[in-house]
Image: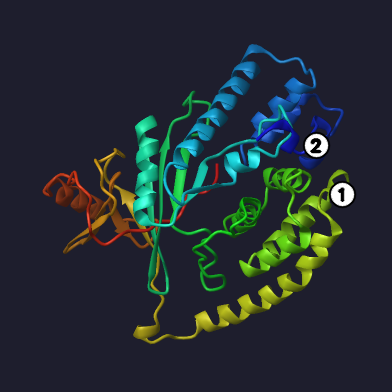
Amino acid sequence: MTSQHRSPFPLTLDLLYELLDIDRELPVRRLLQAARQVRGVLSPLVLSLAALEGTAMGSGAHDELARMSRRADTYRRLADDTARVPGARVVKGPSIARYYPEGVLRPLGDLDVVVPTESALWRVLALVLDRHDSDEAELTELYEGEERHLLAAVWWPGEDPLLDPDHGVEVTTFGFGGEPGEVPLRARLPDDPVHADVLSLAEERFQRPFTVKDILDLVCVMTSPAAPSPRRLAAVAAEFALAPELLELCDRVRAHEPLVAAVPDELVDALRGPAETERLRRAERAMDSARPRTPAGAVREPRYGLQLTTPLRRGAGEHATEHRWREGVITRTPVADFLMVPGELVDPRLHECALAELSALAPWPQRTGHGAPTRPYTREEV
């Protein structure tokens, strides 16, 4: 994206002092210390603004900023790689970073990719593993009715493993995971990339409170030449059951005087009615989900993968397969093997049994498989 497409909104250190509630009389190092204590890896943003405003910086700060710039370049290259997979779409991350003012480094935790099929999911991760050696993988299986969906991810250490957050790529076969019992999984993304980015920000509210980074993301999108029509954005938010979350994020932005004009009144007004309608709909769903169900009407619960092997690119596999034995289920994927469990706590004995069972199995077949696919859900944003 060329510079004329970037937001002209003046992101400054003064603005970050306000957003982080830090006394403006304190030195920039105190602002940086505060930024390191909040979610969202904000330190690259502070450092890039400090450099633009001519703040004196030592070799350590310059080196950290350079590493974070290279981190952003890594994600941009990976985003370009994923474009080789038909139907793959990057949301948030480098996609939103395009709207930040020239020279301002948007913090990047991981790369989020949405794909239309399971085979596309493994192809994306294979491309990642062609470039980077991973030491950690994730897998979650989700169901919406009888439809099965996946989230899979690989992670690897940052350039300075002691100081930098891990790199990660998370790939899903769904656009929005929703909230169990209230908001269903929505498989597709909006067609418009800007709508997809903004609603992906809103969807994060189901995982955590909004952060300063979310506030700045919305500001940069809504003040850029690519800003969507307020009424159209509100309509799409209602269509994807995210009007309450987008309205909350808008209110968070407008709670700060310097940012009030960044979110138009028209968008807030257009969201209020759909947000109330959606809240009522969720309350009804929650009451319905609390009622006893017959076995035929039972909801299939998510399953989570406990990693058993180091992530590797295993040939041309496009599907995962399930191996069942008397103790449980091992899912063998084109990147790693996982013991499937219902929650975070796992009996160490079961883990040992799974490793023993896996060692007795044949190696992963170096071919395209046709087994029962798998599906995932994500670790929290760094």
Amino acid marked by disc 2: Pro
- Considering only order in the chain, which callout, 1 or 2, is on the residue closer to the N terminus? 2
Relative to 99, is 353 above or below?
below
The residue positioned farthest toward the top in the image shown:
59
State the scheme by which the image is colored.
rainbow
> How busy is the neighbourhood of tag 1: few (under 14 within 10 Å), some, or many (20 plus)?
some
Residue sitting nearer the eye, 288 or 191: 191
Q: Residues within 10 Å of mark 2 (few under 14, many from 20)?
A: some
Of circles 2 and 1, the one toward us is 2
Quarter occupied by the N terminus:
top right
Q: Nearer the viewer, residue 378 or 84?
A: 84
Residue 108 shown left or right of residue 266 in the figure: left
* Tag shown at residue 327: none
Front residue of 215 and 102: 102
Tell me the tag on residue 8: 2
Q: Secondary structure at mark 2?
A: loop
Q: Residue at x 66, y 64 (%)?
A: 236
Residue 364, image x, y percentages: 19, 46
Q: In the drawing, does residue 359 fall left or right of residue 274?
A: left
At 34% from the left edge and 40% from the top edge, which residue is drawn? 126
Local secondary structure at mark 1: helix
Q: Give the amino acid at mark 1.
A: Ala
C-alpha span from label 2 to label 1: 13 Å
User: Which residue is label 1 attached to?
Assistant: 261
Tell me what residue is drawn at x 86 percent, y 59 percent. 265
User: Is 193 drawn above or below residue 71 in the view shown?
Assistant: below
**Percent of width and height locating residue 310:** 29, 39
- x then y, percent, for residue 178: 54, 64
Determine whether, in the image, residue 379 is placed left or right of residue 23.
left
Q: Could you say which quadrant of the image residue 69 lies in?
A: top right
Q: Confirm whether residue 48 shows in the render.
A: yes
